């Protein structure tokens, strides 16, 4: 529990929401462990992973065959998790929980999330439910109003809970930066080339020999995800359904030898004339009214705008806002379109695009009384 002061004479006590992390030993699960350390609203009370890890304390569960502790996240392992016992999926007691964070990285994600959503809210980093008609793909600060679709989902499926997935981490930065442009100028066409970090491929996704001194020009299924998710996220909720935004999206997704953080080159055709010199004002205005301001995991600035043409750069941007700020630079008029501009963006795939973004989503939904 946490404490707050109502006035100088009255102390009030807030009961933290009890949460479980499913898939806790994997890369994304470890990000959740770190993101929830000393969280003021949520307390990790149960953790689960595969049968291989079940019954072990957390440190032993992430120890490899040579005895080395395989902690893949920066910083130290939080004390709260070290001696917790890892359960199997079936051993999780939903009656003692308020929320599930799903970091399941396998094809089993859909079955696992379905099992828990019958009783509890589930916030997921997997793609298992992203493209269902009654499931919003939520980015806190961008399409919060689509959270109302979760009530439709509960009713449709006769569940007590719901599933709220994050988008693909490459979609995250694109949708975040397009939102103000769409609202202010109307976006018609988007062309994007991504330069994605090695960590986006997971522990075994990219070989050292494959990425060193190299660029991999294709990431399976990535481009289809970005096209579909961008239109859905930027769409409108009408009559219990999301109407996709009327935007044509073309993208090329590549893998580059950068450890953390995705950089994207974006070209946007707009309906209205757009002055690149006013773009900073547009993003500053959205910073001032961003819906997630003040939430525990929210950055001081949702957007960082650079006029220096050498920014953004992954090494310089990845720590801004503890990885939760999206950085924009190289904003220029695009001559290919009658109205439009081009820009570069940086978004942290392991922070805003992953577990910490999921925690921010949980905070937003808690504020909306959905949890």
Image: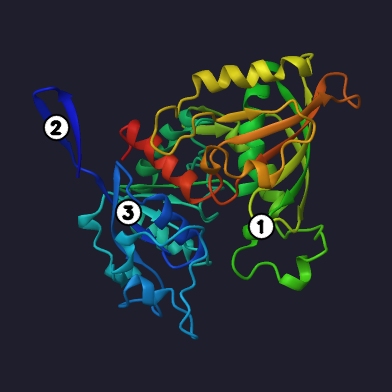
- Report the front residue among 77 and 347: 77
Image point 10% across, 26% down: which residue? 10
Circle 1 residue: 259
Q: CA distance from mark 1 to mark 2?
A: 44 Å
* Location of residue 217 in the rendering, given as x and y in whole percent from the top left corner: 82, 57
Q: Residues within 10 Å of mark 3 (few under 14, many from 20)?
A: some
Q: CA distance from mark 3 to mark 1?
A: 37 Å
Sequence-wise first label, 2 or 3 = 2
Closer to the observer: label 3 or label 1? 1
Sequence-wise first label, 3 or 1 = 3
Q: Is residue 240 above or below residue 20?
A: above
Screen quadrant of the N terminus: top left
Circle 2 residue: 12
Circle 3 residue: 118
Q: Is residue 313 above or below residue 4?
A: below
Q: Is residue 166 above or below residue 329?
A: below
Q: CA distance from mark 2 to mark 3?
A: 33 Å
Question: Is residue 151 at all visible to an observer of this figure?
Answer: no
Image point 83% across, 19% down: which residue? 339
Q: Is residue 8 above or below residue 219?
A: above
* Location of residue 75 in the rendering, given as x and y in whole percent from the top left corner: 47, 58
């Amino acid at each position: 529990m946490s404490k707050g002061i109502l006035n100088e004479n009255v102390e009030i006590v807030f009961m933290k929401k009890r949460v479980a992390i499913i898939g806790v030993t994997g890369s994304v699960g470890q990000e959740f462990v770190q993101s929830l350390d000393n969280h003021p609203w949520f307390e990790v009370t149960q953790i689960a992973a595969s049968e291989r890890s079940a019954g072990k304390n957390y440190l032993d569960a992430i120890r490899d065959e040579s005895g080395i502790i395989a902690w893949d996240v920066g910083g130290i392992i939080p004390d709260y998790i070290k001696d917790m016992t890892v359960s199997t999926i079936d051993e999780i007691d939903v009656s003692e929980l308020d929320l599930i964070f799903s970091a399941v990285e396998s094809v089993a994600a859909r079955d696992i999330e379905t099992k828990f959503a019958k009783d509890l809210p589930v916030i997921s980093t997997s793609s298992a439910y992203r493209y269902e008609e009654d499931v919003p793909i939520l980015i806190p600060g961008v399409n919060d109003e689509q959270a109302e679709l979760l009530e439709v989902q509960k009713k449709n499926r006769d569940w007590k809970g719901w599933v709220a997935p994050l988008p693909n981490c490459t979609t995250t930065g694109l949708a975040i930066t397009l939102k103000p442009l769409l609202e202010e100028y109307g976006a018609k066409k988007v062309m994007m080339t991504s330069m994605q970090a090695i960590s986006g491929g997971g522990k075994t996704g990219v070989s050292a020999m494959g990425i060193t001194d190299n660029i991999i020009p294709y990431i399976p299924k990535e481009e289809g995800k970005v096209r579909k998710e961008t239109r859905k996220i930027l769409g409108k909720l009408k009559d219990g359904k999301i109407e996709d935004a009327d935007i044509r999206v073309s993208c090329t997704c590549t893998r580059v030898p950068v450890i953390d953080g995705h950089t994207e080159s974006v070209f946007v055709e707009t309906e209205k004339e757009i002055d690149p010199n006013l773009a900073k004002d547009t993003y500053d205005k959205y910073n001032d009214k961003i819906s997630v301001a003040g939430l525990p995991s929210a950055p001081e600035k949702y957007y960082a705008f650079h006029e220096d043409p050498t920014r953004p750069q992954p090494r310089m941007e990845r720590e801004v806002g503890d990885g939760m700020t999206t950085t924009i630079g190289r904003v220029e008029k695009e001559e290919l379109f009658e109205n439009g501009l081009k820009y570069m963006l940086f978004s942290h795939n392991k922070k805003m695009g992953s577990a910490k973004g999921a925690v921010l989503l949980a905070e937003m939904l808690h504020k909306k009384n959905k949890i």
